[in-house]
Structures are given as structure tokens and as C-alpha cells.
Amino acid sequence: MNQSTQRVAPHEAAAKSFYGQSEEAFNQQVELLAINDPRLIAVFQKTRAFYQNLGQN
């Protein structure tokens, strides 16, 4: 009997962990990451929305 295992690349696991966390935890981390450039908040939010849409398809 063959069993296949799905391997996830490290960058994919990191993205899933980062973008897949709760809204509150995500916002807290983004605030810390974007402390020197508030424009990054919008970038992170758009990227998260894109990543979550990929998971639904």
C-alpha cells in the first residue's frame, strides 16, 4: 500500500503560519513589523487577503 505524504516547502509553511493566524494576532504582528513605515500595513493586509483567497480556490 502506497502512502503519499504532502511536503510543504518552508516558505509555504511560514506563509500559512503568518497569514493564517487570527485577525487579532495578525494585526498585532503587522503593527510591530510596520512600525517604521505605516504603508506596510496595507501591503500586509492585501497580501493576506490574496493568500487566503488562494486557499479557497
Image: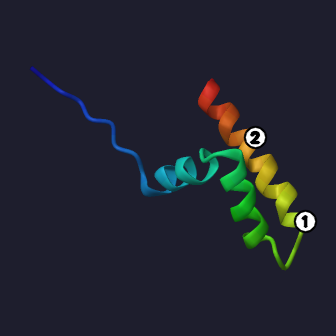
Q: Name the residue under label 2.
A: 49
Coloring scheme of the render? rainbow
Q: Considering only vertical position in the picture, is 7 above or below 15? A: above
Residue at horizontal 83 percent and vertical 65 percent from the top: 40
Q: What residue type is labelled 2?
A: Ala
Comparing 52 with 30, the one in front is 30
Q: Where is residue 5 in the image (x, y as percent from the top left)?
A: 26, 35
Residue at horizontal 80 percent and vertical 71 percent from the top: 34
Residue 39: which numbered mark, if any? 1
The answer to whether residue 2 is left or right of residue 27 is left
Numbered disc 2: secondary structure:
helix
- Going from the N terminus, do you reach mark 1 or mark 2 first? 1
Q: Considering only vertical position in the picture, is 28 above or below 4? A: below
Residue at horizontal 78 percent and vertical 66 percent from the top: 31
Comparing 43 with 24, the one in front is 24
The answer to whether residue 22 is left or right of residue 10 is right
Comparing 33 with 47, the one in front is 33
Q: Position of residue 1 (x, y in %)?
A: 9, 20
Q: What residue type is labelled 1?
A: Arg
Residue at horizontal 71 percent and vertical 46 percent from the top: 23
Separation of residues labelled 1 and 2 (CA atoms): 16 Å
Numbered disc 1: secondary structure:
helix
Q: Quadrant of the C terminus?
A: top right
